[in-house]
Image (cartoon, grey):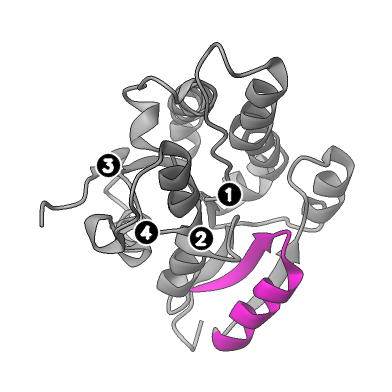
Amino acid sequence: MADGRTGLALVTGASRGIGAAVARALAPTHRLLLGGRDSDALERLAAELPDARPWPVDLTDDAALAEATSSLDQLDVLVHSAGVAGLGTVAESPAAVWRHNLEVNTVAVVELTRLLLPALRAARGHVVFLNSGQGLSARAGWGPYAASKFALRAYADVLRAEEEGRGLRVTTLYPGRTDTEMQEAVIAHEGGEYTPESYLRPESVAAAVHAAVTAGPDAHLTELTLRPRPR
């Protein structure tokens, strides 16, 4: 393309936090679909980016998701950034908490990817999963969330094994604690003091996504772990 943007990217969870930072990082090189449920926030972000439009879809609504993806016949990048963090001990967490974490963090991701596989295959595209350190090592009090992220890790590995031969690249990022509204709620749940400077910036996570997506055609960055540097 004459303006330098070479493909189409869909970023979920783009209304705030890491998702919004990823959209800003990809804007110089990609046309953007901004996924999320906060239409006003998506409109504001789209207004500041050169070639972006809101894509307001509830990812847990199968019918709405099927309709929203039906017109996409080629997609270069799919970044899964949307998610929830429902925490609690095993004794405190009823089935509804486990279901909600798995529904949003895993099942919705699986279904969106399935629906978009033909478009991704057509573009020999790239799928990026924003996982978590909890997807590598689970801690007490994080069971429902960690289970959903372990499942997401397994799904990404299977997708890579099945689709790499078709030219699809699949990257999983495992960011440590990041300065977002979700992180602030987590710290409040844990009873701690929120100190933003102790955490990764969303822009640092977005830079890692950009590095994976813009790697040369001979390169496939499969996994990357990010941790805040000690202050």
Binning the other alpha carbons within 10 Å of mark 3 as few (below 14), some (14 to 19) or many (20 upward) gives few
Q: Which residue is mark 4?
A: 179
Q: Residue 208's x, y, as percent?
A: 30, 56
Q: Which residues are magenta?
A: 30-48
Q: Quadrant of residue 135?
A: top left
Left or right of 117 on screen, residue 3:
left
Q: Earlier in the sequence, mark 4 or mark 3?
A: 4
Q: Which numbered disc, 2 or 4, marks the residue closer to the eye?
A: 4
Residue 40 within the magenta-colored segment of the rendering: yes
| Residue type at the position of mark 4 | Asp
**Residues at badges 2 and 1 in contact (C-beta under 8 Å)?**
yes
| Residue type at the position of mark 3 | Leu
**Residue at figure coordinates x 63%, y 66% from the top left:** 34
Q: Which residue is mark 1?
A: 82
**Residues at badges 2 and 4 in contact (C-beta under 8 Å)?**
no
Q: Earlier in the sequence, mark 1 or mark 4?
A: 1
> Which numbered circle lies on residue 224?
3
Q: Which residue is mark 2?
A: 19
Binning the other alpha carbons within 10 Å of mark 4 as few (below 14), some (14 to 19) or many (20 upward) gives many
Left or right of 69 on screen, residue 141:
left
For the residues marked 2 and 1, what is the alpha-carbon distance in whole angstroms?
A: 7 Å
Q: In which quadrant of the rendered image does the C terminus lie?
A: bottom left
Q: Earlier in the sequence, mark 2 or mark 1?
A: 2
Q: Nearer the viewer, residue 2 or 93?
A: 93
